[in-house]
Amino acid sequence: MTTNPFTTTAPQIAASILSADFANLQTEIDDVLAAGADFLHLDIMDGHFVPNISFGPPVIRCVRKATAAYLDAHLMITDPLRYALPMVNAGAQNICFHVETVDNPADAARELRKLACNVGLTLNPATPVEKLWPAIDLVDMVLVMSVVPGFSGQKFMPEALPKLRQIKKRLRPDQRLEIDGGVNVETIKPCRDAGADWFVVASAIFDHPDRASAIAELRSLIT
Ligand code: DX5
Ligand code: ZN
């Protein structure tokens, strides 16, 4: 378990609780962390920016109480600036917003920098990487989506790989590059080779009968 993934350059596996059993969230969190996940990825969906609704600050607060692991919040919502503070107050440590949801990504990043959190920037598969450039120096991490956001269990889109390479070239050593969507034993190594540092995984961990061996295999492919 990692309490601050920015303190290491080692590749990190983030378990997305979107595929967890929410009736047994404490057990699920304990289980994936004991199985070797480095930190937790929280998929926040509002039913507007994406066609699915997941959870918000009340559940983040419960997750915060359940673990000391780093909490990486991926905001798939139309108004990230409105909800970032309640999420940070609930315990989210990284606020990663979609470039498509704000008028001016650099201004949004500057606003979020005022909060006690790390700040991340992400983009949909259909969005060109150039949209990131005005804000890229202002964030701690960039997340590349390798599925159309909204659901776990989708197929990895290989178009994400050239995006990872292009973005990696623009990042400083203290910034991190994350990949999210369809990451599994077939797709994780190409993502590592393209420059990803952090790997979000939901179904390939939570739906696996042996989560510890699933994570060990994923890690062996990127180390
Ligand atoms: C998709 C979410 C992902 C999702 C990943 O909208 O952002 O984090 O949970 O799920 P898998 O790993 O199953 O593709
Ligand atoms: Zn996500």
Image: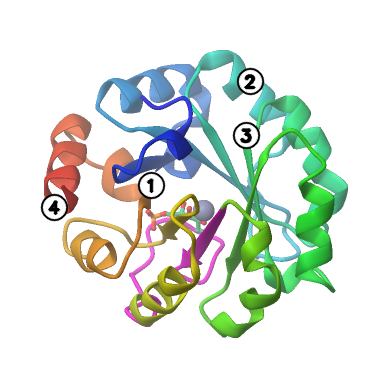
Please tell me how crowded label 4 is: few (under 14), some (14-19), or many (20+) other residues with Cα within 10 Å: some
Which residue position is annotated with label 2?
A: 62
What residue is disc 3 on? 93
Residue that protrudes farthest toward the front in the picture:
173
Q: Residue at x 22, y 68 (%)?
A: 190
Under 8 Å from ligand 1: the CB of mark 1? yes
Label placed on residue 46: none
Q: Judging from the image, what secondary structure is the residue with disc 1 in? A: loop
x%, y% of residue 12? Answer: 33, 42
Q: Quadrant of the N terminus?
A: top left
Q: Quadrant of residue 168?
A: bottom left
The one of 112 and 205 positioned closer to us in this rendering: 112
Q: Nearer the viewer, residue 195 or 206?
A: 195
- Identify the mark nearer the N-term, 2 or 4: 2
Q: Quadrant of ligand 1?
A: bottom left
Q: Which residues are magenta?
A: 141-160
The numbered mark, 4 or 3, whose residue comes first in the sequence reads 3
Q: Earlier in the sequence, mark 1 or mark 3?
A: 3
The residue lying at 33 percent from left, 70 percent from top is: 156
